[in-house]
Amino acid sequence: MDRRQAIASLGSFAVAGMAALGHGTAMAAPRRKGFLWGAASAAYQVEGNNTNTDLWLLEGLPGTPFAERSADACDHYHRFDDDIALLARLGLNSYRFSIEWARVEPEEGLFSPAMLAHYGRMLDSCRRHGVTPVVTLHHFSSPRWFAAKGGFENADAPALFTRYARTVVEALGDRIGWLCTINEANLSFAPNPAVRETAARATGVATFSTFLFSNVARSKPIVRQCRAAARDAIKQLRPDLPVGYTLAMDDFQDAPGTQARAARWRSGMYDVWLKAAQADDFLGVQTYTRTVIGDRGPITLPAETLRTQVGQEYYPEALGGAVRYAAAIAGVPIIVTENGVATEDDALRVRYIDGAIGSLRAAMREGVDVRGYIHWSLLDNFEWLFGYGPKFGLVAVDRATQTRTIKPSARHLGKWARSHPVLRQD
Ligand code: BGC
């Protein structure tokens, strides 16, 4: 399954008017020095045993859509300090990771000082190793109690999410470098009523709604409210902390012989989300591939197309196009918060990194304000429905022994970072 084909589109298909271009109403862009060169992870994919989340429940259901259990994952919950030290040794200067809401607020309204202290230790580890932490508050997984209340379909979600966001920022905000409220807010998987029904029956509730399997017509407007409400609350607490959110964005291109169709698709997919970012401090762009649009929509890729382990076209140059469009509509500084490739062939990853960064520099030459490049992912980890098959990591993980093995691509990205402390545009 190509999960990116499942990206939910809720925007209208109106073509973006020229008036919309470049008219971000951003607050003053945060002044943080240097270019962020980093690698990313997400709590559920690396920590292990996130048993109080909605997704852990889904994994264990009869007929589960997950290929396997996440189980111990990369045991990053215990090994974060070694992993952050490793990232720093590679030459990278930033680490994007997420906080597991279900650990911090295990029951509605019951917050765990011990878990907040755990994430505080991760932030301290970053500081000790000279690494800027880019922290995500929500990366797909939610507490079980939240899903059982209807998740992001529940009109109370903005208040619930904002209370969690406020608690994290009160405790840890002074140690966070950049904060992403919601990861890939525009993403959802193909509708799967069976998953929702089985989960609801297993928990004895009317609607068990997870971020990845929700009624998108109901949930996505509420997701947008969540991120705006959380941003406002965070900015009240810490006006100096740069706050944004992240979007899953393909580069949309016209098929040979077709014109102007990709532009319609692109604006239909993304404009409502990009405009929502106009009042943020930055936008996180997460690009893996392109979508080619023909007369009747996305074309079927020719059989000889080089595909990654998750079925996407291998097309590193997608990054520049996506970033260019994101910046034109959102009008705020961009951080590439994810970009990477699922492959066992690490030489392909090395080439991917060069192709992606090359296209990013071309966009920067045109004046796009890009503050960082954060690769997905630091470790080979739990790739959601696919389980542990796809290898996105710069570092391999033997899950029986938890031994880490640095791949050549990790050193290659480190070399980019060392030789370009500021990613020059020339
Ligand atoms: C997600 C990651 C995921 C990656 C690769 C992004 O959509 O944020 O969690 O592992 O893509 O598929």
Image (cartoon, grey):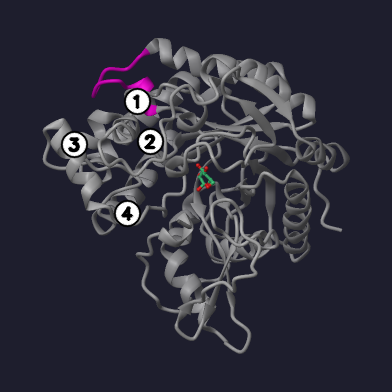
Q: Which mark is residue 102?
A: 1
**Labels 2 and 3: the sequence-earlier one:** 2
Is disc 1 placed on a helix, strand or loop?
helix
Whether residue 247 is situated above or below residue 227 in the rendered picture: below
Contact (Cβ within 8 Å) of mark 1 with mark 4: no
Q: Which residue is mark 3?
A: 149
- Asked if residue 220 lies left or right of residue 387, the reply is left
Task: Pick whichever, 384 or 423, lies toward us.
Answer: 384
**Labels 1 and 2: the sequence-earlier one:** 1
Magenta part of the chain: 101-112
Task: Pick whichever, 175 or 323, lies toward us.
Answer: 323
**Labels 2 and 4: the sequence-earlier one:** 2
Q: Amino acid at mark 2?
A: Ser
Residue 104 highlighted magenta (yes or no): yes
Label 3 crowd bin: few (<14), some (14–19), many (20+), radius 10 Å:
some
Q: Which residue is mark 2?
A: 141
